[in-house]
Image (tube, grey):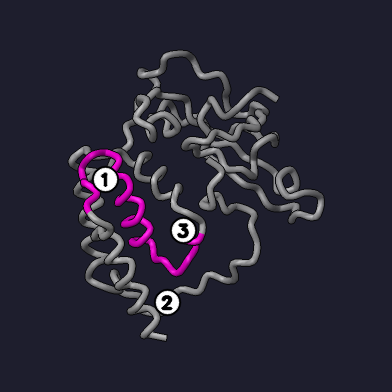
């Protein structure tokens, strides 16, 4: 069960974000499949890495197509997610597809 | 979907306690389920996202209950196979249900 990778050549559009960009995870609650964790929704992080284009699980899971999307590592500060009492040294990284993100 | 699998930040589950000298499989059916799921995936019966989606749709008491990973895989695949037409629902018993029950009784007897 290998999920295909499309690389940069398979992209339908240029990447919207680049490493260093501040992004907000969208506050979305799809009733179908998604890989966006609840605890980052609505929060601001920083793009750390661009992984190229990959099969979008949200559509692949319902057999609605591979629909390749840009994939980024986005890093959030612990305090951004868990509040002022969080360990100030904690950072949380997620791999987020471009449709999960908006510029912040 | 906002399912029980999305556990980041939740409290109260206790420590992760690795089992000393943990075997690869605790019972024979676990190996069979792994082989079945991998074989069906390799044959293109479903993709990895579909199989994850089905596992994550399991009810919370099933997903978090006294299930091991292979049971979650087994239960998720059961519904997936029915929905994809690879397995026809006949009567009330399915192989996945039987293997789940067997593991529960062996887990209970080992305590």
Please tell me whether residue B79 belongs to the stretch shown in magenta.
yes
Dot 1 or dot 2: first in sequence order is 2
Q: Which chain letter goes with mark 1?
A: B
Outermost residue on the top side: it is: A13
- Whichever of labels 2 and 3 marks the residue nearer the N terminus, that label is 2
Q: Which residues are magenta?
A: B61-90
Residue A85's x, y, as percent?
A: 80, 55
> Is residue A68 placed above or below A36 in the rendered structure?
above
Task: Identify the residue under disc 2.
Answer: B19
How crowded is the residue under tag 3: few (<14 C-alpha within 10 Å), some, or many (20+)? many
**Residue at position x 40%, y 21% in the image:** A8
The residue located at (67%, 30%) in the rendering is A24
Residue A3 vertical position relative to residue B65 in the rendered view, above or below: above
Give me the chain letter of mark 2. B
Residue B19 picture location, percent across and down: 42, 76
**Element at badge 2?**
loop
Please give the name of the residue rendered at 24% of the width and 44% of the height, measured from the top-left corner: B41
The residues bearing labels 2 and 3 have C-alpha atoms spaced at a distance of 20 Å
Q: Residue furthest right?
A: A84
Tell me the chief SS of the magenta region: helix
Tell me the number on the disc at residue B9: none
**Residue B4 in the image: above or below residue B31:** above
Report, in whole angstroms, how far the alpha carbon at label 1 lies from the one at label 3. 18 Å
Q: Which residue is mark 1?
A: B81
The residue where tag 3 is placed is B63
Front of the two marks 2 and 3: 3
SS at mark 3 in the image: helix
Q: Quadrant of the C terminus of chain B?
A: bottom left
């Amino acid at each position: 069960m290998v999920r295909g990778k499309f690389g940069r050549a398979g992209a339908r559009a240029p990447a919207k974000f680049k490493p260093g960009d501040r992004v907000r995870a969208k506050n979305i609650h799809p009733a179908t499949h998604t890989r966006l964790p609840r605890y980052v929704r609505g929060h601001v992080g920083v793009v750390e890495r661009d992984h190229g284009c990959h099969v979008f699980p949200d559509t692949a899971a319902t057999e609605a197509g591979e629909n390749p999307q840009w994939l980024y590592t986005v890093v959030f500060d612990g305090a951004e997610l868990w509040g002022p009492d969080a360990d100030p040294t904690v950072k949380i990284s997620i791999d987020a597809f471009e449709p999960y993100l908006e510029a912040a | 979907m906002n399912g029980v699998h999305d556990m980041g930040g939740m409290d109260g589950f206790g420590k992760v306690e690795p089992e000393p000298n943990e075997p690869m499989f605790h019972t024979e059916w676990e190996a069979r389920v792994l082989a079945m799921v991998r074989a069906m995936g390799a044959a293109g019966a479903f993709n990895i996202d579909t199989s994850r989606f089905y596992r994550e749709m399991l009810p919370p008491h099933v997903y978090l209950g006294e299930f091991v990973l292979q049971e979650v895989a087994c239960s998720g695949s059961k519904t997936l196979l029915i929905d994809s037409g690879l397995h026809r629902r006949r009567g009330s018993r399915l192989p996945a249900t039987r293997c789940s029950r067997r593991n529960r009784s062996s887990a209970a007897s080992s305590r």
